[in-house]
Amino acid sequence: MAKIIGGITTSHIPAVGNAIAQGLFEDPYWKPFFDGYPPVHEWLAKQKPDVVINIYNDHGLGFFLDKMPTFAIGAALEYRNEDEGWGIPQLPPFPGAPELSWHVIEGMVADHFDITSCQELAVDHGFTVPMQLFWPGLRNNPDMPKAIPISANTVQHPIPTLSRALAFGRALRKAVESYPEDIKVVVLGTGGLSHQLDGQRAGFINREFDEYCMDKIVTDPDALTKISRMELVEKAGAQGTEFLMWMMMRGALGDKVNLLHSNYHIPISNTGAGTMLLECVD
Ligand code: DHB
Ligand code: FE
């Protein structure tokens, strides 16, 4: 049977894509951020997952405001990246795992999550930057797994509640672990932590709230479901709603997890950047 072995979180800031392209790993501004990744590389090199489920929020490349699925799951053989206007190099397509995608879609819909299935989906920086961070070299990296993108709406209100995001992850775990093949799956939650890119509070970061979220996501994710969406925007900023991705990831890991690694650094671009590696216990 398929097994979810763990989850990893990271911010997906586009400027990171440029820093990678320019090799700025030792640059004083970037070093404290990039130093958060080698322990994750070591774990991935040891575990060698077959598939990565990359939970991210599309920012207007795959979906736009005219059609905005609340939850969308990729079911394609490959996922193209396209120019979004951030000036980051366009990446070659990412190989998919359509058989597992369809199994997961069947399972989620049977579990009353009415998701949008996508046989074609262009993936933006929310998906691609984390892939670059975790599997340097991407397709030249022999360990890069096949990928399934899952996008949730954090762009146009109404967005899902934190409680629904956690429940989505729990249903995802059930769906993945009923897949008959013996494969290892790792789940990413990308985005966040606190940030606001526009409006009067542009540049807003809330370290205290970020640290609270990083603590509870390990020990008591249900406590975080008490945060309303209004409160999330107030405490994390308008784009801090990307924390929903972390909740979806956490739900997929089961009740108990071991925290293997954690790094927090502010600011990177406009964001409180959190990297966490959580290993499933059962
Ligand atoms: C930034 C952060 C994001 O999550 C994003 O999608 C775009 C930009 C930033 O901090 O610059
Ligand atoms: Fe974002």
Image (cartoon, grey):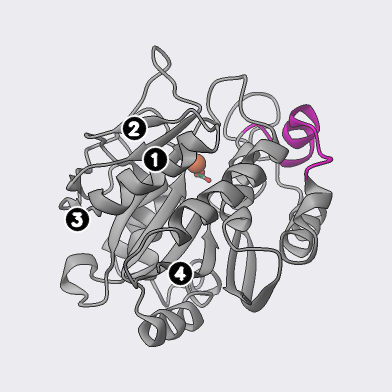
Residue at 45% across / 30% down in the picture?
115
Q: Nearer the viewer, mark 1 or mark 3?
A: 1
Residue type pointed to by label 1: Ile
Which residue position is annotated with label 2? 117
Query: How far across and how far down the image is residue 198, in percent?
Result: 59, 28
Separation (CA) of disc 4 from disc 2: 22 Å
Q: Secondary structure at mark 1?
A: helix
Compare residues 227 and 2 and report the one nearer the observer: 2
Which residue position is annotated with label 3? 95
Q: Is residue 76 above or below residue 71?
A: below
Residue at 26% across / 76% down in the picture?
143
Residue type pointed to by label 4: Lys
Magenta run includes residue 6: no
Q: Is residue 216 above or below residue 64?
A: below
Residue at 43% across / 86% down in the picture?
42
The residue segment tinted magenta is 225-238
Single out the residue that lies furthest toward the top.
66
Q: Mark 2 and 1 residues: CB-CB less than 8 Å, in contact? A: yes
The quarter of the picture where the N terminus appears is: bottom left
- Mark 3 CB within 8 Å of ligand 2: no
Residue at 70% across / 31% down in the picture?
201
Separation (CA) of disc 2 from disc 1: 7 Å
- Mark 4 CB within 8 Å of ligand 2: no
Residue type pointed to by label 3: Pro
Q: Nearer the viewer, mark 2 or mark 1?
A: 1
Q: Is residue 103 above or below residue 70?
A: below
